[in-house]
Structure formats: structure tokens, C-alpha cells
Image (cartoon, helix red, strand yellow):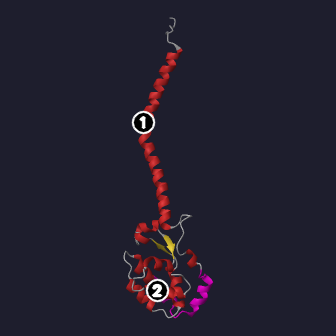
Amino acid sequence: MAKRKLPIKKETLTKTLNTENMAKAGSAVMTALPFILMVGGAVAVYFVGKKLVNGITGTAGEAKDFLTKQEQNVSDAVIEKEILKATISKTEARRMAQGLYDSMAEWETDEERIKQIFDRFQNKADFLIVYKEFGLRPYGGIFGDWWGSRKFSSDRNLVYWLKSELSESDVCYEIVKKWVTAAGFGF
């Protein structure tokens, strides 16, 4: 039996195939469109969120810490030399540092407790040994001390904490300012 050729023109076959392929491709794109939009949206949210978090925590290159230059005025060598003159022990300073942290880490700052601790200082070395024992602790600002705040916080020293938590109207402001500035920090 001989094969019979169908009288189909080449242009008609090409046009039919292209139309079918385009319909299939369009269907595939329409099916994948929600997924593409979700992935694109997630990527955009990630980068925008990262930029916002970096701005909040001050880790972005252009975001400057308002205490950075003042904190550099007191070197570790000066602190080590000065704390030899402290009237409080290292253990006592560690407890005082923890007390200061506890009074500032919660939603409301306990100014009275801060005042009680600062009232015990007899010289700038007392403040410096507490400053050293305080070290760097994650400061979450408005987020307080909860499990998620570490994602939005940066490690900060005692001077930063005090400056961020206290205002001139607080009961302990003047005594804190007195000892912080006596130790060589700006306040």
C-alpha cells in the first residue's frame, strides 16, 4: 500500500505548531505566575527588611552610632590603670553591673535602682570597674529584653545603655552624668 501525502502547506503547519506552542507556553506562565510573584515578593521583603533592621541596629555602613566618638575617648589602658584605685571589689562591681542591666533591660527603666547603685561610687575608678564588668550587652531599645530582641539589637557598653535609657528629667540623671563624665565619657 502506498503512502498518501496530505496536501498541507508548509506555512499552515508552521503556523499551527507555533500557535499550539504559544498556547502551551502561555498556560505554563499563567500557572507559574503566582509562584514567580511569591518568590519575587519574598526576595524584595528580605532585602527591604534587612535594610530596615540594619538602620534600627546601626549596623549599616552609613548609620552612625551617636556615642562612637565619645566612647573612644577612654582607652582600655586608661581603664585598667584607673580601676586599681577602685573602692569596690570586682565581685561587687559584677553584681552592680548586673543590677544596672536588670534595671534597664525591662520595659520600664528603674531609675531609683540606678541611683542606689551610683550613690555607692566614691571615685571614678568605681564607675570604671562597673563599666568594665558590664562589658558589651545586646541593646534592643524599644524591643526590650525578649527572645526576638537579639535579632534587632547590637552589643553596647554601659555608657550607651545609660544615655539611651535616661533623660534629664529622671531622678538619677545628674548623679549618673557626674560619674560618667568624671570617667572621661561624654554624656
Instruction: State the image quarter where residue 168 is shown.
Output: bottom left
Point out the stretch of residues depicted in magenta.
Answer: 73-97
Up-down relation of residue 48 to residue 185 (above or below):
above
Question: In the image, what residue type sits under mark 1?
Answer: Met
**Mark 2 or 1, nearer chain start:** 1
> Residue beneath label 1, please?
30
Instruction: Look at the image and say whether residue 164 sits in the magenta stretch.
Output: no
Q: Residue 78: image x %, image y %?
A: 61, 86
Dot 2: within a 10 Å radius of its alpha carbon, few (fewer than 14), some, or many (20 or more) residues? many
Dot 1: within a 10 Å radius of its alpha carbon, few (fewer than 14), some, or many (20 or more) residues? few
Name the residue furthest right.
Answer: 77
Between disc 2 and disc 1, the foreground one is: 2
Instruction: For residue 129, say whether it is visible.
Output: no
Name the element at disc 1. Answer: helix
Instruction: Look at the image and say whether residue 88 sits in the magenta stretch.
Output: yes
> Residue beneath label 2, please?
176
Question: In the image, what residue type sits under mark 2?
Answer: Val
Majority secondary structure of magenta residues: helix
In this view, the residue in front, 170 or 106, is 170
Instruction: State the image quarter where residue 115 is shown.
Output: bottom left
Up-down relation of residue 80 to residue 145 (above or below):
below
